[in-house]
């Protein structure tokens, strides 16, 4: 009977060891799968971020170009206006300096 108890204890110990090994393998597999899924999500997020940044840069370049064109148009209008008023300004200066 003592041998039966010892045999049962050994069997229980072996079962526990096998369960522990099985549990470790399952955890490693789950961890590996989780890491692979996380890496895929990270790669997808990076890819999406690159697209968003590229779109934002393109939009910003377009806005900057429009702003530069508008400022150029304003500067040209100011230059035309200044040229139109130049004779009157010169006459005023000459009148104040000469008189």
Image (spheres, rainbow, N blue to C red):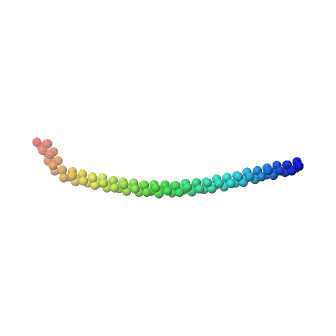
Residue depicted at 49% across the width and 55% down the height: 49
- Specify the farthest residue to the front: 1
Q: Seen in the image, is 63 located left or right of residue 34?
A: left
Quadrant for the C terminus, please. Answer: top left
Asked which quadrant contains residue 96, the reply is: top left
Q: Seen in the image, is 96 located left or right of residue 4?
A: left
Residue depicted at 76% across the width and 50% down the height: 16
In this view of the protein, which residue sits in the foreground, 63 or 27?
27
Q: Position of residue 88 (x, y in %)?
A: 15, 49
- Specify the farthest residue to the right: 1
In this view of the protein, which residue sits in the foreground, 31 or 1?
1
Q: Seen in the image, is 95 located left or right of residue 57?
A: left
Q: Position of residue 89 (x, y in %)?
A: 17, 47
In this view of the protein, which residue sits in the foreground, 5 or 36?
5
In this view of the protein, which residue sits in the foreground, 37 or 7?
7
Q: Position of residue 26 (x, y in %)?
A: 68, 54
Q: Position of residue 10 (x, y in %)?
A: 82, 50
- Specify the farthest residue to the left: 99
What is the total number of numbered labels drawn onto the structure image? 0
Residue depicted at 40% across the width and 56% down the height: 59
Asked which quadrant contains residue 69, the reply is: bottom left
Q: Seen in the image, is 65 located left or right of residue 37?
A: left
């Amino acid at each position: 009977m003592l041998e039966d108890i010892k045999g049962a204890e050994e069997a229980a110990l072996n079962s526990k060891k096998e369960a522990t090994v099985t549990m470790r393998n399952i955890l490693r597999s789950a961890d590996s799968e989780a890491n692979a899924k996380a890496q895929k999500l990270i790669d997808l997020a990076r890819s999406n971020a690159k697209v968003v940044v590229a779109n934002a840069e393109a939009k910003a370049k377009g806005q900057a170009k429009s702003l530069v064109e508008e400022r150029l148009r304003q500067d040209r209008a100011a230059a035309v206006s200044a040229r139109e008023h130049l004779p009157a300004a010169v006459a005023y200066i000459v009148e104040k300096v000469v008189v």
